[in-house]
Amino acid sequence: MRFVMESEARGCEVIVSGKLRGARAKAMKFIDGYMVKTGQPRQTYVDQATRHVKLRQGMLGLKVAIMLPHDPSGRMGPKEIQPDVVQIIEPKEDISKRTVAVV
């Protein structure tokens, strides 16, 4: 997870499920950073993978989701800006507050 986050990902989620230690199956979830769970941004920004590993004790499942960063060039991530990103623009100076010199 550290390697993924150091390579400029916005977020990472790893879920390991199955017989991890004992006879009973468990699921462990590891989350780091920011992750979108629903809507169009999930389809655009989140890259997912699922793998199954056959062990002597039984099957082990791995799910990995990585949220890609915004990239205007489109090489490292999507070009589209997320809808929940807000830019605050400073207001312009008001004309009535300025003093007008009369000649």
Image (tube, grey):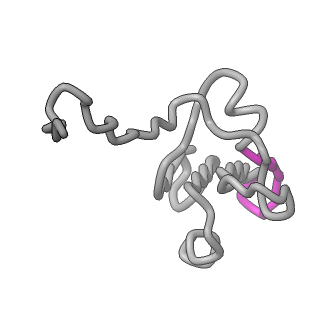
Which stretch did the figure color magenta? 46-58
Quarter occupied by the C terminus? top left
Image: 50 above or below 56: above
Residue situated in front as seen by the camera: 33 or 77: 77
Quarter occupied by the N terminus? bottom right
* Residue 87 position within the rendered picture, expressed as x and y whole percent measured from the top left: 45, 40
Residue situated in front as seen by the camera: 99 or 102: 102
* Residue 90 position within the rendered picture, expressed as x and y whole percent measured from the top left: 33, 41
Which residue is depicted at the point 77% across and 48% down? 47
Image: 55 above or below 41: below
- Decide if residue 92 is on the left or right side of residue 44: left
Which residue is depicted at the point 71% across and 53% down? 62
Image: 5 above or below 18: below
Which residue is depicted at the point 27% across and 38% down? 93
* Residue 67 position within the rendered picture, expressed as x and y whole percent measured from the top left: 65, 50
Q: Is residue 45 magenta?
A: no
